[in-house]
Amino acid sequence: MTLDAIGSFILSMPTWAFVCVMAWQIAWKGVALWMSARRRHLILFIIFLIVNLLAIPEIIYIIVIKSRESKKRKGKR
């Protein structure tokens, strides 16, 4: 897919759909950036800050970190 095709696709999207996609991405990106900064995962923080892939890497990171935390909590009991 060329940049012209991507640009025309984005311009042809309804405004409400574009706003929904941007809100989705900003929310997940914000949570992932916050979590990676608190855990001092500098490389992941930089990747999340630079790369925009509709928040898919951010969602995977959050799910993995949450599952690791829940396993640690269960192991301590």
Image (cartoon, rainbow, N blue to C red):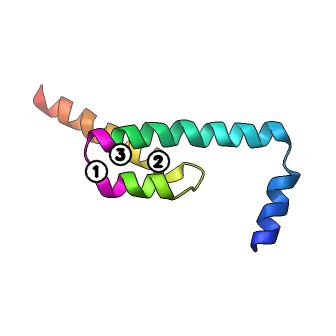
Q: Cα distance, mark 2 to mark 1?
A: 13 Å
Q: Where residue 32 sits in the image (x, y, percent)? A: 42, 42
Q: In the rendered view, does 67 fall on the left or right side of 10? A: left
Q: Secondary structure at mark 1?
A: loop
Q: Cα distance, mark 3 to mark 2?
A: 10 Å
Q: Amino acid at mark 2?
A: Glu
Looking at the image, which residue is at 75% across and 70% down? 3
Assess whether mark 3 and mark 1 are in contact (beta carbons under 8 angstroms): no
* Residue labelled with disc 1: 41
Q: Amino acid at mark 3?
A: Val
Q: Secondary structure at mark 3?
A: helix
Q: Where residue 16 sits in the image (x, y, percent)? A: 81, 36
Q: Amino acid at mark 1?
A: His
Q: Which disc number belongs to residue 58?
A: 2
Mark whose residue sits in front, 2 or 1: 1
Farthest bottom residue?
2
Looking at the image, which residue is at 73% across and 38% down? 19
* Residue labelled with disc 3: 64
